[in-house]
Structure formats: structure tokens, C-alpha cells
Amino acid sequence: MTLVQAQVPESEYRLLRQRATTRGQPMKEIVRQAIHAYLHEEPVDPADAIFHAFPLGASGRKGHETARRHDEHLYGPARRR
């Protein structure tokens, strides 16, 4: 492992210390978990159809399949792998 040093505001340090105490983990483990979560966030694609497709259809109509087939409505027919 590589040692990384950083200065943080006192208020954030207190929150880190409190989180570590609450979880019963060393503060360095809490920092590692935070870094891991930050680096592995799933990017959001603003062009994704989910953000531009609504309304897909009227809800409550008998036989309306939007809820069950939403992926197909948004992204097209599923491809077999």
C-alpha cells in the first residue's frame, strides 16, 4: 500500500472519527472505504433514454405493459448473449 496524507477541515475530521468509532473500525479503514466508493461510482450518462422517455404510456389501463417491459420500451428488444 501507499501512504497518502491529506489535510481536512476539523468538522470533517470529527465526522470521520465519529463514523470510525460508531463502526468500530480504524479511521484509516473508513477513509479507504470512502475513497473506494468515490472511485467506483457508476457514471450517469445524461443521454440515457431513461431521462428522456417519459411519459411512456398511460398507467392503469388494462393490458398496458409499460411497467413489465420498461427496459424494452427504453432500450429496444433484448439481445441474447
Image (spheres, rainbow, N blue to C red):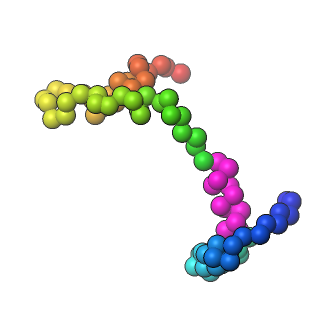
- How many badges with numbers are in the image? 0
- Which residue is at a point 85% across and 59% down the rendered structure image? 1
Q: Is 81 part of what is drawn in magenta? A: no
- State the image coordinates of residue 6 (x, y, percent, origin top left): 79, 66
Q: Which residues are magenta?
A: 29-40
Q: Main secondary structure of the magenta part?
A: helix
Answer left or right for 67 relative to 21.
left
Whether residue 24 is visible: no
Query: Front-most of 60 and 7?
Result: 7
- State the image coordinates of residue 63 (x, y, percent, origin top left): 16, 26
Q: Is residue 9 above or below residue 69?
A: below
Answer left or right for 26 relative to 67.
right
Whether residue 36 is visible: yes
- Which residue is at a point 71% across and 75% down the rendered structure image? 26
Answer left or right for 34 relative to 73.
right
- Which residue is at a point 43% across and 24% down the rendered structure image? 75
Q: Is 39 part of what is drawn in magenta? A: yes
Q: Quadrant of residue 28?
A: bottom right
Q: Is residue 54 above or below residue 12?
A: above
Extreme residue toward the right, this view: 2
- State the image coordinates of residue 37 (x, y, percent, origin top left): 63, 55
